[in-house]
Amino acid sequence: MYPALKGSQLRLFDDAQIHTLHEGVVRLLEEVGMKVKSKQAFEIFEKGGAIVDPVSEIVKIPREMLEKAIKIAPSKVVIHGREEKHDAVLEKNRVHFGTGGTVMYALDFETGVRRVTTTHDVRDLARLVDSLDNIAFYVIHTYPADVAEEDVDANRFYWAITNTTKPIMGGMYTMKGLREAIQISEMVAGGADQLRERPFVSFITLMVTPLVMDGHYTDFLIEVAKKGLPIAVPSEPLAGATSPVTLAATITINLAETLAGLTLAQLVNPGTPTLIGTTSSIMDMKTGTYVAGAIESSLINAGVAQMAQYYDLPLYATGGQSDSKLNDCQAGYESASQAMTLGLSGANWIHDAAGLLECCTTVSYEKTVIDNEIIGNVLRVLKGVEVNEETLAIELIKKVGPAGNFLANPHTAEHFRDEFFMPKVADRLNRITWKAKGSMDTHQRAHLLAEELLQNHRAKPINPEIRDEIRRMFPGIKGEDLV
Amino acid sequence: MSNVLEELNQKVIEGKLEIVQELTRQAIAEGHDPEEIINQGLIMGMNVVGVRFKAGDMYVPEVLMCARAMSGGMEIVKPLLMGKEIVSAGKVLIGTVKGDLHDIGKNLVAMLLESVGFNVINLGTDITTEQFIQAIKEHKPDVLGLSALLTTTMLGMKDIIDQLVEEGMRDEIKVIIGGAPISQEFSDEIGADGFAPDGASATELCQKLLA
């Protein structure tokens, strides 16, 4: 099991406010409802006791129905790794950070120039995630433009599964692709039951704000729920555009939408491991465009996280992004402010936290390494300050006495690795040594670290016979397997 | 190499003082030559530590624990050398100049020098020019290490070097300087033999100057 640390030190709401927000959620689902464009979802809701109107496609979810779904949905969802040490146990305030997207561009590792992403990026970013300690999971965050759309899902999941043993999650593009991705996963797991037992893949569908369940994505949701595999059902209100500009309303509409998704998943297959979710952010008031690195996005996420903990439901959240085009100061401060806020909120599955630039459109290998370090800083804060006789060290201080030093004391050697975060990217040299080593900035140092990892790191492979069989069965999978 | 010496190597690398002492006694009991114990057991382990420290795989407190374990072993073997001196890497006299009470950086340099086999005399802080000169006459070190952390006290380094020249002792000793405000330019300006930007490079500097 991944040794998740506990967040939720940041509390935005008192009990009365939590109650007010929940009553808002109930009113939205009872009085406004969701426009459900999937025919089968509409029927499932109707059968489940929702108040429906076929003409307007509106589904109103009564309080009892909502609260029942919240109750029967699992409070704990485990997304496994191919190796058990990576199993992500998502519940309460246990915090995990990982990648997310999905983007269509990468800053090329050799040239630094922005280009479209390919299957190689899916593969190499999986390996990079596999090698970076503070990144707990791999949400497949690139779109491979070098294969046909109908082969995209199979390629994404194949290259992810074969290049990391950390938990994997991804969005889907076609129903054929979704079924192939599940089939590939079942083959690697050794069968459908084995996959359901230890699911190392999980899926993302979405609600469309405000208050719409799309036909396409909702059918994906039903398909995954039928399989009993873990699914995230986030929504993405943009404050000031698709939701009211006030953050309280945005949090409420986000919760209403994602809880409608949760209700559907539980109606399809009671007990489906479901993550309610938010990918919410704001509309930039200068340009009228979506922005990813806004601090308000994190505040919305932190609010949703506190509500998820109130509902006792695991949460798929979003944070650690930047709108900068390169690894500059803005990229660092936006990502760090967001990641710290999300970590302290106690959100369980914080995706988009590694590698993203430019309003969630571009991935950078160097940024992935830098974000791993940002997350390391956040995790150090979550670890907190341990207070016991050994850490208080009164006897030690007595022994060393005034004017002594602690550097050469065994107590220091014994504890410094636990007490201090050891950065790999940060430069702490004096100027002379820094200059002697090439006067490198953060991006350049991260490049060297990424280069070494990409050259040398290989994830624990899957059974080669199964790998060959998958390649025979799915000729649409493109590219060479690494050895 | 015999098992006990190999294990000694390993335990020096792990910084285990008590075990190193125990293994040293065992090696003596098994009839190993004292010089063999020192060179192949203790120092060889410490050499590995030096390499790992430089590569960034080990950190200062760990190196100090290794050095402590190594000297713990040394203390036990030394009496058996029967007058034979352990080959020292050189003798270094070190101190913080007058008016300056900064201690920890200089102590770190001293400890790291000892860890690679230098014999270090640490005078402490707030040392006057006269005290330095007196100590040099007494100990006859190969290297004089001067530390200053304040821009107001660093100028005292020049006084000491000038005094060495005046007393005709300058050619007999290498002078190295260090501390946060110190630069290579300042070192050249006051006529020092070398400057190191941090503790780890100070040991390399001494080795280079005495090579």
Image (cartoon, coloured by chain):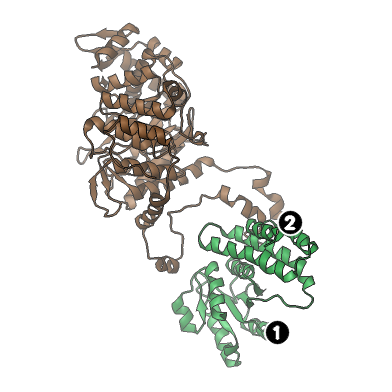
Horizontal relation, residue A276 to residue B84: left or right: left
Toward the viewer: A4 or A333? A4
Q: Is residue A205 visible?
A: no
Instruction: Report the residue marked by disc 1.
Output: B138
Q: Position of residue A315 (x, y in %)?
A: 41, 28
Q: Colour of chain B?
A: green
- Look at the picture and state if A456 lies above or below A472: below
Q: How many marks?
A: 2
Which chain contains the residue that carries disc 1? B
Question: Dot 2, crowdedness within 10 Å: few (<14), some or many (≥20)?
Answer: few
At label 1, the amino acid type is Glu
Residue B119 can be seen in this image: yes
* C-alpha gap between disc 1 and disc 2: 35 Å
Q: Report the residue marked by disc 2.
A: B18
Q: Colour of chain A?
A: brown
Q: Quadrant of the C terminus of chain B?
A: bottom right
Q: Circle 1: is it few (<14), some (14-19), or many (20+) Cα within 10 Å?
A: few
Residue A481, by quadrant, is top left
